[in-house]
Image (tube, helix red, strand yellow):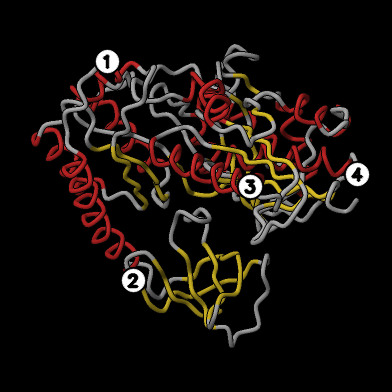
C-alpha cells in the first residue's frame, strides 16, 4: 500500500517547469499521496517525469531520463511511469509510438487529467499554493504563461501557447502564501516579464505588480528574470531604484548584437536600441547587475557578426553572462534556414565568449574586495557557508564563500565583507 501511494516527481529543464511540479506535488499531497521530488534513489511506487523540450541538449536529457525509468518500469523496479511537460507536449505521438513502458503522456496544461489518473480532483481552493522544493528561503514565482513573441529560434510559443498573465491579486496571494512558508526571496519568472499585463490590463503592468509585491510581509528580496528588451517598460527602473526590496538585478536576454542576425531572429529591436536601453538602465541604476544570454552559431552568423558580438560584450562588461549554441528546432521560423555553422565552430565561439566573460567577471569581482554586502546564506558545503548578494541569482550566478567557522544560519541574511575574488566566486567574512 505504501508503494501504491508513493510518487516520485523528476523535474528537468527550467524554473518554470519546477513551479509546475511544485503545484502538482501540492495537489497530490492534498489527495493523500506521499510525494518526493528529485529523490536520489527511486524504488517502487510511481514516477512522473516533468520534461523539457526546448533545445537539443534538453531534449536528449529528457529522452535519456525517460528511457532510464522505462527500463525500471519494465524490470518491475517501479510500478507506474508517467511523462508530462514540454517534451511530452511537443512530441507526444512520437513518444507514444516509441516508448511503450510509459503508462501515459501528458502535455503542459494537463494538470487536471494527471490528477484524475490518481483519482484525485483538482482543488481550486489550492490555487496559489504549492510545495516548495527550493532551499525554502527562496522560491520562483511565475507571473504568466506562454509567449506572444515570434523569435525565429524559439519553440516555446509552440509548446506553451500564447501569453496569459495571472492577475496582480493572484500573484500577490501566492507571494503571501510563500512568505508564510518562510520564503524571503521571490524570483519572478515568465517567458517575458515585460509583456506582463498586456492581455488582461491592456497595458504593461510589471511596475504596478512590483509595487504590490513589495507590500507582502516577510519578503525581503524580489528578483527579475527574463525581461525582453523590446518596448521595455522604463517605469520598472523607477520601481527598482526606489524600492529596497527589489534587487538591483535584471536578467535581460539580448541574444545578439548584429542587426542582420537580430532581424533574422525576429527580435523586434536593433543594435542601437539595445545599446540605448543598456545605457539608460545603468544611468538610472548605477549599482545594477545585468545578466544576459547570447546565442552563437545562428544560421548565417559570420566572423564579422561574431566579432561585433565580442566587441559589444567587451564594451558593456555584463556582470553575468551565459552563452547558448544555436539549436536547429523544427517548426520554428529559423528551421527554414540552413544550419550552416558547424557544431565545432559553435562550440569554439561559445568558449571564446565565456573566456572573455571570465576576465570581465574577475575584474568586476576584484572591485568588490573590501566592500560589505547584505548576503543570504543558501547552504553549508564542506568548509564554507555558501551565500549570495542581491546581485546574484541562485544556481546560475556568483556565490560568496564564508568559512564555516563563523556562526551563520541557512536562510538568514548577514552583512559580509568581501575578502577575496575569483572569476565566478567571492570570498568573505562577517562584517
Q: Distance between the residues labelled 3 and 1?
A: 34 Å
Say whether residue 431 is visible: no
Q: Is mark 2 on a helix, strand or loop?
A: loop
Q: Which of marks 4 and 1 is nearer the N terminus?
A: 4
* 42 lies left or right of 52: right
Residue drawn at 41 percent across, 21 percent down: 231
Say whether residue 340 is visible: yes
The residue furthest front is: 75
Residue 430 image position (x, y, % from top left): 56, 79
Q: Which residue is labeled 2 in the image?
A: 422
Residue 98 image position (x, y, % from top left): 52, 29
Determine crowd level at label 1: few under 14, some 14-19, many 20+ residues with C-alpha closer than 10 A: few
Give the mark toward the camera: 1 or 2: 1
Q: What element carries label 3?
A: strand
Determine crowd level at label 4: few under 14, some 14-19, many 20+ residues with C-alpha closer than 10 A: few
The quadrant in which residue 204 appears is: top right
Residue drawn at 32 percent across, 33 percent down: 327
The residue furthest left is: 304
Pointer 3 and pointer 2: residues touching (CB < 8 Å)?
no
In the foreground, 90 or 357: 90
Q: Residue 32 carries which label?
A: 4
User: Which quadrant: the C terminus?
Assistant: bottom right
Residue 239 image position (x, y, % from top left): 55, 37
Q: Which residue is labeled 1 in the image?
A: 336
Amino acid at each position: 500500500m505504501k508503494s501504491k501511494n508513493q510518487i516520485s516527481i523528476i523535474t528537468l529543464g527550467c524554473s518554470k517547469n519546477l513551479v509546475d511540479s511544485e503545484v502538482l506535488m501540492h495537489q497530490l499531497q492534498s489527495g493523500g499521496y506521499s510525494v518526493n521530488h528529485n529523490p536520489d534513489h527511486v524504488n517502487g511506487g510511481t514516477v512522473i517525469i516533468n520534461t523539457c523540450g526546448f533545445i537539443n541538449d534538453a531534449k536528449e536529457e529528457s529522452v535519456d531520463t525517460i528511457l532510464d525509468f522505462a527500463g525500471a518500469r519494465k524490470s518491475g523496479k517501479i510500478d507506474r511511469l508517467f511523462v508530462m511537460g514540454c517534451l511530452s507536449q511537443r512530441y507526444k505521438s512520437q513518444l507514444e509510438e516509441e516508448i511503450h513502458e510509459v503508462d501515459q503522456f501528458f502535455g503542459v496544461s494537463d494538470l487536471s487529467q494527471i490528477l484524475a489518473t490518481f483519482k484525485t480532483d483538482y482543488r481550486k481552493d489550492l490555487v496559489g499554493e504549492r510545495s516548495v522544493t527550493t532551499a525554502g528561503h527562496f522560491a520562483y514565482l511565475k507571473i504568466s504563461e506562454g509567449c506572444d513573441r515570434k523569435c525565429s529560434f524559439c519553440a516555446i510559443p509552440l509548446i506553451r501557447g500564447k501569453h496569459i498573465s495571472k492577475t496582480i491579486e493572484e500573484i500577490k496571494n501566492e507571494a503571501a502564501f510563500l512568505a508564510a512558508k518562510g520564503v524571503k526571496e521571490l524570483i519572478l519568472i515568465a517567458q517575458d516579464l515585460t509583456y506582463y499585463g498586456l492581455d488582461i490590463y491592456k497595458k504593461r503592468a510589471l511596475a504596478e505588480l512590483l509595487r504590490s509585491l513589495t507590500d507582502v510581509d516577510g519578503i525581503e528580496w524580489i528578483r527579475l528574470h527574463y525581461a525582453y528588451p523590446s518596448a521595455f517598460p522604463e517605469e520598472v527602473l523607477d520601481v527598482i531604484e526606489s524600492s529596497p526590496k527589489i534587487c538591483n538585478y535584471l536578467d535581460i536576454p539580448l541574444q545578439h548584437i548584429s542587426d542582420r542576425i537580430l532581424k533574422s531572429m525576429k527580435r523586434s529591436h536593433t543594435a542601437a536600441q539595445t545599446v540605448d536601453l543598456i545605457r539608460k538602465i545603468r544611468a538610472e541604476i548605477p549599482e545594477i547587475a545585468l545578466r544576459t544570454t547570447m546565442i552563437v552559431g545562428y544560421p548565417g552568423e559570420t566572423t564579422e557578426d561574431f566579432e561585433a558580438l565580442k566587441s559589444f560584450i567587451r564594451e558593456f562588461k555584463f556582470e553575468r553572462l551565459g552563452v547558448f549554441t544555436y539549436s536547429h528546432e523544427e517548426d520554428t521560423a529559423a528551421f527554414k534556414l540552413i544550419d550552416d555553422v558547424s557544431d565545432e565552430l559553435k562550440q569554439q565561439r561559445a568558449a571564446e565568449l565565456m573566456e572573455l566573460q571570465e576576465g570581465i567577471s574577475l575584474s568586476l569581482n576584484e572591485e568588490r574586495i573590501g566592500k560589505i554586502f547584505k548576503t543570504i546564506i543558501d547552504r553549508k558545503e564542506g568548509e564554507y557557508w555558501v551565500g549570495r548578494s542581491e546581485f546574484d541569482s541562485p544556481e546560475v550566478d556568483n556565490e560568496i564563500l564564508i568559512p564555516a567557522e563563523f556562526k551563520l544560519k541557512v536562510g538568514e541574511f548577514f552583512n559580509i565583507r568581501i575578502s577575496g575574488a575569483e572569476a565566478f566566486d567571492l570570498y568573505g567574512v562577517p562584517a
